[in-house]
Structure formats: C-alpha cells, structure tokens
Image: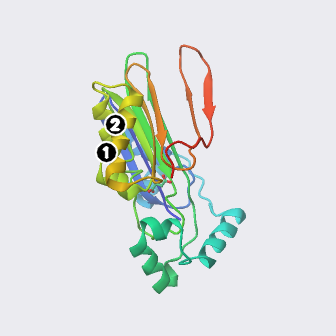
Amino acid sequence: MELDAGICKDLDLSTGSVAGMTEYAHPITVARFIMEETNMVEMHGDRALKLMELYREVRRENLVTPPKLQRWAKMLAELGAGGGYLEKHHQKELRVLMEHPEYRRTPKIGTVGAVAVDSRGGTSAASATGGYWLKMPGRIGDTPAYGAGFYADRNGAATATGVGEYAVRLLISRSVAGRMKTGTAQHSVMAAFREFEGRFGKDNLGIIAVDRRGGVGVYHNTEGMGHAFKTGRDRKTTVRISVRQGGT
Ligand code: ASP
C-alpha cells in the first residue's frame, strides 16, 4: 500500500507533497515537513520519511488491518467480473492485474481533504489518500499533485477526491480557485463540475472549497462524500455524511 498527500498555503505560495509512502499512517505530516522544513516541493514517500526521521520521531507500522484484508480478498476474487471501479476507470490497469497476479498488492484507501481561510483571507488546502482499491504499485494520483488534488491562492482554496487521473487532467482544484476570483465557492465548484462532467461524465469526483470571504462550496457526483464545515462566526460545526448529490 502506498500513501500520497499534499498541502499548500497561499500566503507565500508554499507547498509540499509526498507520494508512494509506506509504513507511516500520516503522509500529510510528511508533506507539511517538506513544505516547512525544506526548499523542495515534492518527494518520494519513503525517502521523505527517512529525511523526516532525522528530525522527528516516526512510528513505522503495518497499516494493513484484518477488515481491509478481507475486503481486498473479496475484491480480488471478483476481479474482472464487471461493474467495478477498475472496469469503469482503469481498464488498462485491470488488464495488467489479470495478466500479472504479482501486481495485486494489499490495500489502503480513503481520501481526506481540508480547506481553510483565516480572518485576513489567507487560505490553505491539504489532502491525503491511500488511492483506490487495487491501484497499480507505483501509481500516483491527484492527491499529491499541486493544482489537481489541492490548491490555494488569494481567491480561495479547494481539494478534490475521486478518480485522480481525471482531476489531474483538468487541474481541478486550480480550476475551482481561478473561478473564485469572481464567484463564490459554491458557484465556482458548480462551474468547475459542469466543465468536468462535460469531459468525464458522472460518478467520479467530489470537491470541497472555501473562498476568501469564508463562503463554503461542496459538491460530489458520487454516491457519497462525508463532509463537515465550521465558521468562526457561528462557532457551529455542520457535518453531513454521504449526501447523494449528482451521482448517477
Ligand atoms: N483521488 C484519489 C486518487 O486518485 C482517490 C480518492 O480520492 O479516493 O488517488
């Protein structure tokens, strides 16, 4: 299993990202280390972890849990049966997995993203993931890709989850931020989705965004995407889980 993460701040256009990290559950900590403690912006995961270990305590661990293993085994048993994520979005990788069983590695999935704006309009974005089930070893998605999986500038911040290969092609987080120059976060997310879905269809993406005035934007065209937001004004946290929006 290989983890990716990326983080950035608009104030000084600082960013850090890490890809393909194993044995450590907090890739975002490593991305932040790269952003704050080095002059680099991107690193290979395990090399980055080694570097961080010189300065921070790192607890290496096996991230594969029994429930994940069970689900992985089930997915392997059903591989190629049709209707799955690989059949839909990664047909060429599916073919490799069918022909080369040694490429069927253990899983780690799930993406978590965050965006924030402070009282002076400073924005930041962060995202971390294990990618998707049965992804190809060595595959890097949108999550550590600045402008694709995460982005923040003076207009706002955005982060994405979903089929990374599509998010990279349209630099989707950058696309949302650019639209926030004139539009609200929600308006910008919807406008970016219209372009995205025109190219890649539905059931493949979720975005959260915040504009510099603190407006929140959320949309996903998938079955579910848990999300929560909190504003300084009302001090309330609003949490929504698996709201079906534009899914097919
Ligand atoms: N975007 C991630 C990737 O392609 C996966 C996800 O968001 O679930 O690696």
Q: Position of residue 33 (x, y in %)?
A: 43, 43
Q: Which mark is residue 191?
A: 2
Q: Is residue 22 visible?
A: yes
Q: Specify the color scheme.
A: rainbow
Left or right, 2 with reference to 6? right
Q: Is residue 154 above or below residue 227?
A: above
Q: Residue at the spot x=30%, y=40% of the render?
A: 175
Say which of 97 and 179 sits in front: 179
Q: Residue at the spot x=69%, y=69% of the render?
A: 70
Q: Considering the numbered disc 2 on the image, is that residue within a helix, a strand or a loop? A: helix
Q: Which mark is residue 112?
A: none
**Amino acid residing under circle 2:** Ala
Q: Position of residue 235 (x, y in %)?
A: 60, 17
Where, by quadrant of the figure, is residue 193 drawn?
Answer: top left
Q: Considering the numbered disc 1 on the image, is that residue within a helix, a strand or a loop? A: helix
Where, by quadrant of the figure, is residue 151 drawn?
Answer: top left
Residue position marked by numbered label 1 in the rendering: 195
Q: Is residue 147 visible?
A: no
Say which of 235 and 49 sits in front: 235
**Disc 2 vs disc 1: Cβ atoms closer than 8 Å?**
yes
Distance from the alpha carbon under mark 2 to that under mark 1: 7 Å
Q: Residue at the spot x=56%, y=60% of the render?
A: 23
Q: Position of residue 171 (x, y in %)?
A: 30, 47
Where, by quadrant of the figure, is residue 119 drawn?
Answer: top left
